Image (tube, helix red, strand yellow):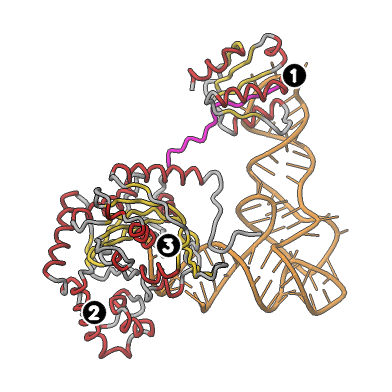
Amino acid sequence: MKAPRGTQDLLPGVTEKWKYIENALQELSRNFHYKEIRTPIFEHTELFQRGVGDTTDIVQKEMYTFTDKGNRSITLRPEGTASVARSFVEHKLFGSPNQPTKLFYFGPMFRYERPQQGRMRQFFQYGVEALGSADPAIDAEVISLAINAYRVFGLRSLKLVINSLGDQESRENHRQALIDHFLPVKDELCSDCQARLEQNPLRVLDCKKDRDHPKMKTAPSILDYLTEESAQYFEQVKGYLDEMGISYQVDPNLVRGLDYYNHTAFEIMSDAEGFGAITTLSGGGRYNGLVQELGGPETPGIGFALSMERLLMALEAEGIELPIDERLDCYLVALGEEANRKAAAIVNQLRLAGVQTDQDYQGKKFKAQFKAADRLQAKYVLVLGEDELANQQIAVKNMESGQQETIALDQLIEYMKTRL
RNA sequence: GCGAUCAUGGCGAAGUGGUUAACGCACCGGAUUGUGGUUCCGGCAUGCGUGGGUUCGAUCCCCACUGGUCGCCCCA
């Protein structure tokens, strides 16, 4: 039996890294004053159709959708924002006096795709959502949180790309301009783009196949079609970023794949060598119509999500080791029948006193037990043999210094606690 | 969804249509009645992803399936 395609087991040795990263991101979230939310792993399919958008690749071909025994159409969540917005509406969080509502989440997402490194069918995201504020300062806040989610681990080869998709009016004007621009040469575009021109002409812009088409360079930029208000908003966001000392690059062709985005859109990529085809580490943006679309009051929102798998890849690419201490405090080596009988109780006492302790359960010889202790990087080895037992004592060896002393058994816990 | 490539012990890795499937690392035991290292000696795949087929005989040839990896699409 194997784990299903595109899923993976996280085994001891890597779970410690995940735990470390989760803890660090949790602390970062707390400093930015975001609170944790946990939503279901599956939702009604309709949530994603309405929230993420029917024309997106995610909804059209990547969802894990099934019918449950009650004949409901259920989908394993492909992303987190729709669920958070749904929960925000369902629990009327907009009624709380503390606005905006600032939330973070962590958990598995599911997309049916061809797996390769950095792209799993089940993958883990950390994300944040700030609902209820249309202040450009909060756009900058979320972007800062996103970039610092990498910097706190020492990552440096990062590229922040931002764009504005504008408001409804900007988008419609731009959409029309794109159609007018490309329609005369529609036949020269790839089949995907011919369809895109009808459904979502914005996405023609980031097509790889038609990248070199002459009409591509002269295509109308969204930035030229922003309404006065949208343009000003974008300027303010950039102003806040400048003020924070966060460098970025404006890419008018940055188009996020989800329908709900408007105004600010951004992506963080890795510059590191040998990162492969997938360089996007995280992405996010503003989604001012989403909450209303899901039946709530008109509520602005912005958020982003990063992938744990890609964060770990970035750490590897930059050769960053997380400071994880895997050493064991204590390993008890027992010698003889009587000692074996006593060993478990002594180990148990140490553990309950907060000393991380282990012993042999494989019937190993004395020397082999010592080797095991060494391999586990035990800081101390306790030797319990007949001599020690006869005197109600135990030998304690500091494995780093090699020093060993014999102490009374009833002082062991006290002794160990002062040394660890 | 499309294209390419790969699959041998815990890990890495050689190999061949036919008696015992190299080697390295790791692990276990001994040399060394109670102290981590080194060295030496010994042990460790009735098995070569799964299922079929060809053959007197398949880990090796053929087909399908499963999974990994790389690229495309798209994204986190």
- For residue A154, the mark is none
In the rendering, at what x and y percent does residue A50 appear? Answer: 37, 71
Residue A371 lies in the magenta-colored region: no
Chain identity of mark 2: A
* Discs 2, 1 touching: Cβ within 8 Å: no
User: Circle 1 is placed at which residue position?
Assistant: A338
The answer to which image quadrant residue B31 occupies is top right
| Residue A281 located left or right of residue A346 | left
Which structural element holds mark 3? loop
Magenta residues, dominant SS class: loop
Q: Is residue A281 visible?
A: no
Chain identity of mark 3: A
Which structural element holds mark 2? helix
Q: CA distance from mark 3 to mark 1?
A: 59 Å
- For residue A276, the mark is 3
User: Circle 2 is placed at which residue position?
Assistant: A175
| Residue A192 located left or right of residue A113 | left
Which residue is pictured at 57% across the width and 26% down the height?
Answer: A351
Front-most of residues B11 and A6: A6
Which residue is pictured at 67% across the width and 30% down the height?
Answer: A360
Front-most of residues A102 and A308: A102
Q: How many marks?
A: 3
Q: CA distance from mark 2 to mark 3?
A: 33 Å
**Badge 3 amino acid:** Gly
The answer to which image quadrant residue B76 occupies is bottom left
* Discs 2, 3 touching: Cβ within 8 Å: no
Residue extent of the magenta highlight:
A321-338
Residue A322 lies in the magenta-colored region: yes
Which structural element holds mark 1? helix
Q: How many residues crowd around disc 3 within 10 Å: few (fewer than 14), some, or many (20 or more)?
A: few
